[in-house]
Amino acid sequence: MIEYLKLENVADERGEEPAKVARTLVRLGYDLYLRFGPSRDSRSGVSFYPEHPTERMEHNIGSGDKQLTKDSQEAVIKRLGRGDTTTEGLTVLDVSPNEVSQKLVLSCDEIVELDPKPEVLKFQIELMEQDDSVCVVVIPDDVAKLPPLPKTIEGASVQRGGASAKNNFQISEKNYHKNKKSNPELHKIFWRAFVHLRDKDEFPVEPQYKQVWETVYDEVETERQLNEPIPKKRTYDPHEHIFTIDSIDTPSPKLNWLIAGTDGRVSKQGTFSLSSLPSMMTKLKRTSPKI
């Protein structure tokens, strides 16, 4: 049996907002769930089958952890981004056992009743009222696959986007070096930032690598501060490969990147340091990538 984790607790441990954790999980192809604890009062809902959405019936929602529909997952992310924890109007998935009668017609037109065939019916339940006892939960294995937070010393606080947060998900030295893989998309990200700066009137000379890095950082940091459930598409990093990035004022600045596979889950991840950017920019100036 899965022991689900409260999204709020996961966010606290990572030093991030619940909306951001939820958005990252959904973007990686994972799901959000609602936990219905034991309750003396009945929980009002309306159940229906997706194939027949207009045929609805009253439903008393029992205890348990139930998966939110895709639309309701997006709705939850938006609500969390506004600090709204209401549940009214959300829809969850559920199943019920059913038996289908089976008949066998013989050559003599005789009909033989066979044992019923068991099947599972999938239906949806829309929550019709607010329930403060319901909370959003996630699967531990999904949380374990979240991109790591910036490397830090055990027990120390980590600077993420200008805000200090307790980091209980430190990357070990062994895994840190293991994750130092290449990502060709980083070339395009920094080249877009370089071209943008180079073509601006206020840059009479060629922009330096630290200015290029800080331009990319500013874009990601602005997105973090706005904390929009569904942020606008990034200019330099349109495919959202950068998960976190340090300011140049941080000692040994680095960024954490990830690549989602065809199933939406993380297929590759790693780090890139500011100290590696000068050599990258030199190569890009000789052979610029197609962007």
Image (spheres, rainbow, N blue to C red):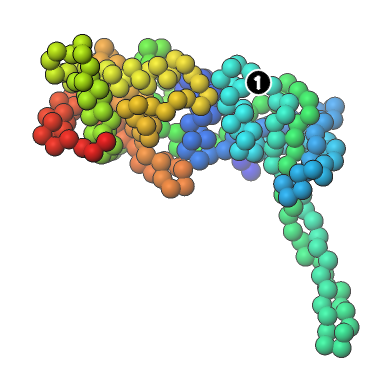
Q: Which residue lies most toward the front here? A: 201
Q: Does residue 152 appear anywhere in the picture?
A: no
Tell me where residue 269 appears, x and y as whole percent: 34, 37
Q: Is the residue 189 above or below the residue 121 in the image?
A: above
Q: Quadrant of residue 18?
A: top right
Residue 130 falls left or right of residue 18: right
Question: How many numbered marks have been drawn onto this rendered protein structure?
Answer: 1
Q: Is the residue 217 above or below the residue 104 in the image?
A: above
Q: Name the residue under label 1.
A: 85
For label 1, the SS is loop
Q: What's the residue at 21%, 37% (across, down)? A: 289
Q: What's the residue at 22%, 17% (across, down)? A: 200
Residue 135 falls left or right of residue 184: right
Task: Report the quarter where the C terminus lies.
Answer: top left
Tell me where residue 234 appears, x and y as whole percent: 38, 27
Tell me where residue 33 appears, x and y as whole percent: 63, 35
Q: Which residue lies most toward the bottom here? A: 108
Residue 166 falls left or right of residue 151: right
Q: What's the residue at 35%, 26% (across, down)? A: 235
Q: Is the residue 114 above or below the residue 65 in the image?
A: below
The residue closer to the viewer here, 68 or 71, is 71
Q: Is the residue 49 above or below the residue 187 in the image?
A: below
Task: Report the quarter where the N terminus lies.
Answer: top right
